[in-house]
Image (cartoon, rainbow, N blue to C red):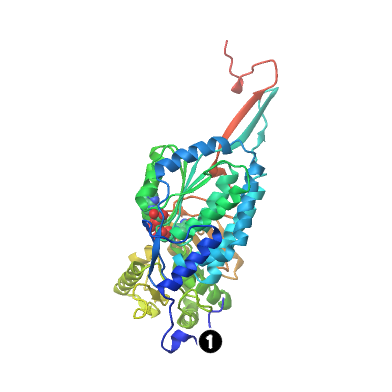
Amino acid sequence: MGVGGVGERPWQHGGVSFPTASDLHLLADEALRACGADPIGNGPHPARTPITGAVLGGAAATVDPDTAAARATEAFTAWRTVPGPVRGELVRRLGEQLRLHKADLARLVTLEAGKIESEALGEVQEMIDICDYAVGLSRQLQGLTIASERPGHRLMEQWHPLGPTVVITAFNFPVAVWAWNAALALVCGNPVIWKPSEATPLTALATHALFEKAAATMDVPAHLNQVVLGDGSVGAALVADTRLPLVSATGSTAMGRKVGPVVAQRFGRSILELGGNNAAIIAPSADAELVVRGVTFAAAGTAGQRCTSLRRLLVHRSRVDEVLGRLTTAFASLPIGSPLEKGTLVGPLINTAAHDKMQAALAAARADGGTVVVGGERHFADQVPDAAYVRPAIVAMPGQTHIVHEETFAPILYAMTYDDFEEALALHNEVPQGLASSIFTTDLREAERFLSAAGSDCGIANVNIGPSGAEIGGAFGGEKTTGGGRESGSDSWKAYMRRATNTINYSNALPLAQGVEFG
Ligand code: NAD
């Protein structure tokens, strides 16, 4: 990503033209049709674009939660006995559809979530990658054979499908998070019920249409994936449904606080992927080039609307002036604008409410003694008053005050100074969230201490790379108020299955375990 030296752009000399509502409507309709979904109508679910704030129309009503649960339950009875590799074949075909329609789906991600083209394409690529991963996994849902303490006995474990899986997704990864969950759930033998964000109904319907195209090429049960559009109350109905043993919910910690107890109360299983407050430690030996590029992408990419966005910078006192100086220059030259325009690196916030929250956080930071060294101001408000474009901000803070402990879902990077490594680690781990973290250092001891049991307390800990932009091969998720869930790679698949431990006696005797004599 280029973070400096950007050439002159239209908005820099007085204005940028934004597409009209009908242009945007047309773009959305083209992409929907290409994916095999219905064009935008006047249904009950408003479809809106953060590019201008325009309402594009209304997505059609979908199935209600109760009917979806009943259909998924029926689909499960058939799907759970289909061999894993055959289930994998369905996901392979889904991956083919995603490859064919990568640009169409990415266009909808741009229109509804406001991502720039390369990030939107990257999100769909992530879906393709997880499909590939899940296809391989469909032949590797392996249990152990365990040494039995009894003669003539075999002890083993099997992994069986768990049941219909609820996937609740946030606006900022409107399709990748569904794919992380759905690809795994499907190869594990579970039908999926998807409650997407209210902000991204069209993207969800297009994805579902691609899934249905893939499913239509095979003899598979109906309703292996269902989309249930609606607000949090629709999600809550699914969360409470005892027919649905697994709820994978991605969103704010506030949402997780509601969902987690309800699922626990009914002894369901949950994967909670909640808010982060991610930091980078900039050590005395840090490579300045890596810092500027890594920090700028992690803090300003996706307009600071990634769960893994960099929000806290802990800089060694010896490097503060240099690092903040260079970052200020980089932030000041970031091209802000319509994500449909080539060259834009910072698109819009999801809505004007997000802008209001950003301004409130900046005011709180100033009240705590912070200084906004760059950014924070709104752009294009006269042209697109219903959209929210901002320059990503860096705020020099006197310490890690209350506002720094909160996740504000906007591009604010709080910079703080430290003197010794233990102090940096303590500051790093002080916040309630525990998602992603990083250290920039060329000191091997510091790097290893950061990764050790006494180091970062996050689910993701990186060295010489920012906290955002995870690969699908690793397990993704975080600790503390981030919820503790893991999805995507490594052994995350086990959360989608139930484990059965089996003892088989192939002898003529009946020895009891632990040498117990009974009669
Ligand atoms: P949000 O919490 O407002 O909404 C997320 C989803 O939860 C939406 O689909 C919403 O309708 C649903 N929901 C809300 N209340 C519910 C309830 N009571 N029961 C069931 N479902 C309910 O989040 P958002 O604004 O869409 O997304 C931003 C947040 O998501 C940030 O906090 C971000 O850090 C987090 N996020 C986390 C991850 C992760 O993997 N840890 C990934 C992406 C986003």
Residue situated furthest left in the rendering: 367
Q: Secondary structure at mark 1?
A: loop
Depth check: 479 or 316 in front? 479
Some atom of ligand 1 lies within 8 Å of the CB belonging to the residue at label 1: no
Give me the residue at 44% from left, 37% from top: 243
Depth check: 298 or 105 in front? 105
Disc 1: which residue: 7
* Residue 258 x %, y %: 36, 48
> What is the tally of numbered marks visible in this picture?
1
Neighbourhood count class around disc 1 (C-alpha, 10 Å): few under 14, some 14–19, many 20 upward? few
Compared to residue 221, the image places residue 503 above or below, namely: above
Query: Quadrant holding ligand 1?
Result: bottom left
Compared to residue 54, the image places residue 270 above or below, namely: above
Is 512 left, or right, of 359 in this rendering?
right
* Residue 272 x %, y %: 45, 50
Quadrant for residue 148, please give it.
Answer: top right
Q: Note whether residue 47 is visible.
A: no
Is 118 left, or right, of 20 in this rendering?
right
In which quadrant of the rendered image does the C terminus lie? top right
Compared to residue 370, the image places residue 102 above or below, namely: above
* Residue 165 x %, y %: 49, 44
Amino acid at dot 1: Gly
Is 295 left, or right, of 92 in this rendering?
left
Depth check: 377 or 474 in front? 377
Residue situated furthest top in the rendering: 519
Quadrant for residue 499, please give it.
Answer: top right
Give me the residue at 56% from left, 55% from top: 210
Is 9 left, or right, of 198 in this rendering?
right
